[in-house]
Image (cartoon, rainbow, N blue to C red):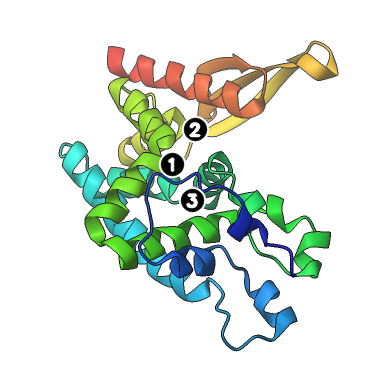
Amino acid sequence: MTPASPADSAPSPLKYQFINAALLTEALTHKSHVNERKNPDRKHNERLEFLGDAVLSLVISEHLATQYPQLSEGALSKLKAKLVSETALANAARRLDFGARLQLGWGEELSKGREKKSLLADALEAVIAAIYLDGGLEASRTFTLDVLGEELRQVESQQATPGGDDYKTQFQEWCQKRYEILPCYVTVRESGPDHHKLFEVEVRVDGKVVGVGQGHSKKEAEQMAAQRALEQTERR
């Protein structure tokens, strides 16, 4: 007797109950698995991934447009890009333990395919499509918003704090509108041990220092510097 594959043997972590369980199996089957077995009756998840990308885009776009009617098209597009990014989808797939449930070929097994962001993200898109085909758009919407709940809560928190989303982007847009130039970030000081370094960064506009920030990464320090610069513009 052939041992059950991970997707067939593991208990489902999904809150959705499939009518056609074959759709879930297809969604969690990578093409490497099918190619190695040369089984004409077995399907891999690329077809569902294609459909799932469209369903995901619709669900997230609708949610953001409804939730944040005050935001511009550009701001909504930035939020959407974060939510449907490979990193966000892979993180959500990990929370559902999709890595353990994927059906992979030996090549992907040897290259640690169960940990690859691209494979995990693709699998989640495929599952979104599988639920759409099995239960309709509402079921797929419910699943999508639930599985990305952590990422959606981060967006809500950022929107609740003015400027909490991305100070660097906001300051860049302000500089382009006001001066038609881009700000420049310069690391002026590094201190502390290698495992806990502290960076100090200046943001300059046309050679003039307009904000200074500190952080345990250059990115964090740059964000603080941009925040300080934005605070200065609000006082003028």
* Residue at (78% x, 61% y) in the render: 109
Q: In which quarter of the image is residue 21?
A: bottom left
Task: Check whether the beta carbons of the residues at disc 2 and disc 1 lie within 8 A of each other.
Answer: yes
Q: In which quarter of the image is residue 146?
A: top left
Q: Say how many tags the image has.
A: 3
Task: Check whether the beta carbons of the residues at disc 2 and disc 3 lie within 8 A of each other.
Answer: no
Q: What residue did someone put label 2 on?
A: 206
Residue 118 visible in this rendered orientation of the protein: no
Q: Percent from the top left, x then y, of residue 53?
A: 40, 63
Q: What residue did someone put label 3 on?
A: 85
CA gap, disc 2 and disc 3: 34 Å
- Indicate the secondary structure of the residue bearing disc 3: loop
Q: At label 2, which amino acid type do we have?
A: Asp
Q: What residue did someone put label 1 on?
A: 181
Query: Which of the marked residues, 2 or 3, is nearer the chain's N terminus?
Result: 3
**Local crowd size for mark 2, using a 10 Å CA cut-off: few (<14), some (14–19), many (≥20):** few
* Residue at (39% x, 67% y) in the render: 20
Front-lying residue, 162 or 94: 94
Q: At label 3, which amino acid type do we have?
A: Ser
Q: In which quarter of the image is residue 135?
A: bottom left
* Residue at (58% x, 50% y) in the render: 98
Indicate left or right for 56 with 112 as reference.
left
CA gap, disc 2 and disc 1: 8 Å
Q: Nearer the viewer, mark 2 or mark 3?
A: 3
Front-lying residue, 107 or 155: 107
Q: Percent from the top left, x then y, of residue 11?
A: 55, 47
Among all residues in the image, which is located at the extreme front? 1
Front-lying residue, 118 or 43: 43
**Local crowd size for mark 1, using a 10 Å CA cut-off: few (<14), some (14–19), many (≥20):** some
CA gap, disc 3 and disc 1: 29 Å
Task: Check whether the beta carbons of the residues at disc 3 and disc 1 lie within 8 A of each other.
Answer: no
